[in-house]
Amino acid sequence: MNTWRLSATAAGDLLRIGRYSRRKWGKPHSDRYLAGLHGRFAMLAERPGAGIARDHISPGLRSFPFRVHVIYYRRIATGIRVVRVLDGRRRPERLLAGH
């Protein structure tokens, strides 16, 4: 079984997503949304090639959509490392510099 890990930046993204969705739609919705993201991370850890290659942003970077967000990740020996979880309307090129 492959695993997924979060970068410190991605962990911060999840905290912000959770806080926003709790404020906007309540705790049950927030919990379901975050659980859905975690489920998508697990699927990507098992099938890391499922995402779209984003080598034009950074070599080895991949992305996969989840509702209104996009998961940006890299393959690692044991699965994936999630580097960011961004609103799909944002421009990733600037936000992913150095990842």
Image: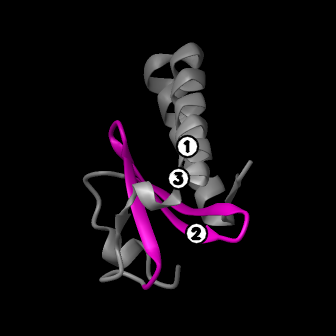
Amino acid beneath label 2: Arg
Which residue is depicted at the point 42% across and 67% down? 62
Question: Under tag 2, what secondary structure?
Answer: strand
Packing grade of label 2 (10 A; few <14, some 14-19, many >=20) is some
Q: CA distance from mark 2 to mark 3?
A: 10 Å
Image marks 1 and 2: residues in contact by CB distance under 8 Å? no
Q: Is residue 7 magenta?
A: no
Instruction: Please report the bounds of the magenta region as a residue range.
Output: 59-86
Asked if the residues shown at circle 3 and circle 1 are in contact, with their CB atoms under 8 angstroms apart, the answer is yes
The verdict on residue 62 being magenta is yes
Residue at point 45%, 74% (across, down): 61
Rendering coords of residue 52 (x, y %): 34, 63
Q: In the figure, 2 relative to 62: above or below? A: above
- Left/right placement of residue 40 relative to residue 38 reads left
Residue type at mark 1: give it: Met
Q: Position of residue 45 (x, y in %)?
A: 61, 53
**Which residue is tagged 2?**
75
- Residue 43 - label: 1
Q: Amino acid at mark 3?
A: Arg
Residue at image position (59%, 18%) is 27
Q: Along the line of sight, which residue is nearer the eye, 35 or 44?
A: 44
Mark 1 closeness class: few <14, some 14–19, many ≥20 residues within 10 Å: some
